[in-house]
Amino acid sequence: PTDGAGGTLGHLNGFDVSNNTQLGLTFTYMATDNIGVELLAATPFRHKVGTGATGDIATVHLLPPTLMAQWYFGDSSSKVRPYVGVGVNYTTFFDNGFNDNGKNAGLSDLSFKDSWGAAGQVGVDYLINRDWLIGASVWYMDIDTTANYKMGGVQHHDSVRLDPWVFMFSAGYRF
């Protein structure tokens, strides 16, 4: 993800969030031949969070369900259907904690505020036959949150920006 942090975390050398790959599932309802509404769900993402000064200091788990309004180019019988979408992302964070590096640095009580943000996508579907298709898409999600934690017993609230680019390859069935 494109990451960054403010406050104390932002002043630590080289704030970084690891990449992660998960299984995603989308459901698309075609309101017309060209207008679709898509819901993205995924298995939980697990990211390691670190700084240049200390290495990995924590593990963060999140779910980013996303709802998109889409415009499909061409008609419904076209073999190739490029599309664009805009929508909203809700990210919930859970089961987060500092590892031994973080704890040894005096960090404790990690939590993140859930996030609402904009999302966008571009993609293309290829019809194999009347019912089956394969596709590829790129998504961008605006995920801005607040990290709450204690450092040396003092409470901190730092802004954190994740803003991932998500690459998806898919197989689908039309009915």
Image (cartoon, rainbow, N blue to C red):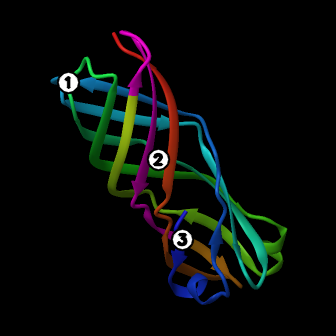
CA–CA distance in space, label 2 to label 1: 31 Å
Inspect the image, locate mark 1, and give the three-letter code of the amino acid beneath it.
Asp
Residue 13 sits above or below residue 1 on the image:
below
Query: Sequence order check: which comes first, mark 1 or mark 3?
Result: 3
Residue drawn at x 32%, y 40% as measured from the top left: 67
Inspect the image, locate mark 2, and give the three-letter code of the amino acid beneath it.
Pro
Q: Residues within 10 Å of mark 3 (few under 14, many from 20)?
A: some
Q: Residues within 10 Å of mark 2 (few under 14, many from 20)?
A: many
Residue under label 3, please give it: 3
Q: Where residue 146 sits: x, y (%)?
A: 47, 70
Chain part drawn in magenta: 126-147
CA–CA distance in space, label 1 to label 3: 39 Å
Picture quarter with the N terminus = bottom right
Residue under label 2, please give it: 64
Residue drawn at x 44%, y 48% as measured from the top left: 138
Q: Where residue 115 sits: x, y (%)?
A: 40, 58
Q: Residues within 10 Å of mark 1 (few under 14, many from 20)?
A: few
Lateral position of residue 129 relative to residue 151, left or right: left
Residue 49 sits above or below residue 53 on the image:
above
Judged from the image, the secondary structure of the residue bearing numbered disc 1 is: loop
Lateral position of residue 113 relative to residue 121, left or right: right
Q: Where residue 20 sits: x, y (%)?
A: 65, 51
Q: Does the segment drawn in magenta span residue 141?
A: yes
Residue drawn at x 41%, y 55% as measured from the top left: 140
Q: Where residue 66 sits: x, y (%)?
A: 38, 43
